[in-house]
Amino acid sequence: MIREFRDFVTKGNVVMLAVGFIMGIAFQGVVTSLVDNVIMPIVAIPFGQPNFDELTLQVGDSVIMYGAFVTSAVVFLLTAFAVFLFIVKPYNALAARRAVEEDEIGPTEVELLVEIRDALRSRPV
């Protein structure tokens, strides 16, 4: 059982998943800092404040704090945009470049052998 567990933990997929998770947590700080310290102050320029937490609506004795929701929604959208801009777009560009490079390499050895076999089969005897 210990050997089986060791094999499970040392498989590439589990290790890579753990590394990706740790890197994601570390990257969260970078994205949070970008949104909180760079983008939200830019949002504050036209609105006069970097968040909307003070916006409330009083109905009878209840206070509806819709500003906190608006701030959370804006932060979510800006975080998603930052992740898209700095991770997804470069990754897609890299993947597209690799796909083009693989196409330029040409057929594999197996593909060439299959073509030769098919050509030989189709020749008249």
Image (cartoon, rainbow, N blue to C red):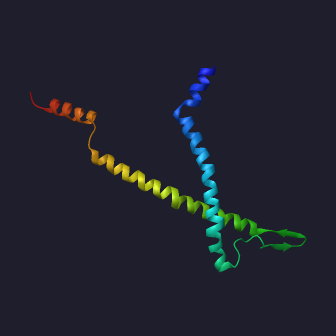
Q: Position of residue 81 (x, y in %)?
A: 56, 63
Question: Can residue 73 be seen here?
Answer: yes
From the viewer's perspective, is residue 105 above or below residue 34? Answer: above
Q: Is residue 36 left or right of residue 99?
A: right
Quadrant in which the N terminus appears: top right
Of 71 and 94, nearer the camera is 94
Quarter of the rendering containing residue 93: bottom left
Question: Can residue 77 be seen here?
Answer: no
Quarter of the rendering containing residue 123: top left
Q: Position of residue 67 (x, y in %)?
A: 75, 70
Quarter of the rendering containing residue 18: top right
From the viewer's perspective, is residue 83 above or below residue 68? Answer: above
Of 119 and 94, nearer the camera is 94
Q: Position of residue 113 (x, y in %)?
A: 23, 32
Q: Residue at x 61, y 59 (%)?
A: 31
Quadrant in which the C terminus appears: top left
Q: Is residue 70 left or right of residue 24?
A: right
Q: Residue at x 21, y 35 (%)?
A: 115
Q: Is residue 57 left or right of residue 16?
A: right
Q: Residue at x 63, y 64 (%)?
A: 35
Q: Residue furthest left?
A: 125
From the viewer's perspective, is residue 11 above or below residue 102? Answer: above
